[in-house]
Amino acid sequence: MRIRFFLLPLMLGISPGVIAGENSSPGLLGEWRGEGGEPVLIFDSPTRLRFNSEVRSYTRSGGRFLVQEETGVAAYPYVLESGLLKISFPGEGVVVFRRPAKSSAAKPAGGQEYLVRGSFCSYSGSSNYSGSHSSSRKAFFDGRGRFTTGGESSFNTTLYDGGTAGGASTNVGPGGRYRVQGNKVLLTLPDGSTGVATVNRRQSDGSVSELMYEGTLYAKGLCE
């Protein structure tokens, strides 16, 4: 039976003395698994978790996880004790989570590609007495480890007779795969070549809105 988050406040009736780590997160961050390896629960940060790949924002208060759902905030009482994380789910009772083998309790598990998602664009342009030139590049990240690239350029030239001439062209790049490690985005192209983009700006929820690659700024805002 699949466990999902629902909008129901629950009470376990457990003494607060057995609730650990209420005001700090290091004991929770990282990956947890239920019996038989399912479900999978990953705490990426003190405010963001993933439950079977579903991304949710959360806080903790009074021995409960307060999880932001589509319809509101859901409360899930929990106990962190003796290396076990026990969470109460509606209709399913208490599910016991354990650390998987070789998982670190101090660091969140990998797989943060979802933080880099959508279109990131760069722009450059110049002009002088003889005309103008502009170019833009776009990289689209799918949030699951794949990206595509493309670009376009245009020019406008002033002719000797006072007229103008111009043109535009577009191109599609090779794309490839990417991995997110902290503030680095590791890029791998189909030919095996690699590159590294660095995070220039994040939003309050941890998602990335600006990247720097080879000295060029790629930003979501530049795609508008």
Image (spheres, rainbow, N blue to C red):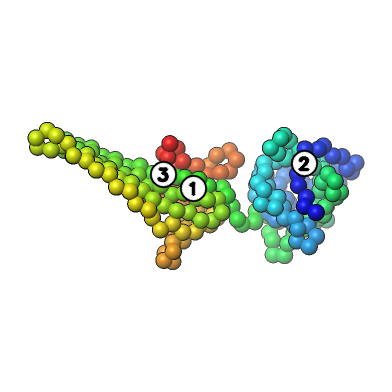
For disc 3, the neighbor class at 10 Å (few under 14, some 14 to 19, many from 20) is many
Q: Nearer the viewer, residue 211 or 25?
A: 211
Q: Residue at x 70, y 56 (%)?
A: 31
Residue 126 can be seen, yes or no: yes
Q: Residue furthest bottom?
A: 192
Q: Residue at x 65, y 49 (%)?
A: 44
Q: Quadrant of the C terminus?
A: top left
Residue that label 2 marks: 6
Residue 19 can be seen, yes or no: no
How far is disc 3 from disc 1 in space, using C-alphas? 14 Å
Q: Tag 3, which secondary structure? A: strand
* Count of numbered circles on the image: 3
Q: Are marks 2 and 3 in contact (CB under 8 Å)?
A: no
Q: Are marks 3 and 1 in contact (CB under 8 Å)?
A: no
Q: Tag 1, which secondary structure? A: strand
Q: Residue at x 60, y 55 (%)?
A: 111
User: Residue 107, how many percent across, how many down?
Assistant: 65, 54
User: Residue 60, how many percent across, how many down?
Assistant: 75, 40
User: Residue 200, how many percent across, how many down?
Assistant: 47, 44
Residue that label 3 marks: 121
Residue that label 1 marks: 199
How far is disc 1 from disc 2 in space, using C-alphas? 34 Å
For disc 1, the neighbor class at 10 Å (few under 14, some 14 to 19, many from 20) is many
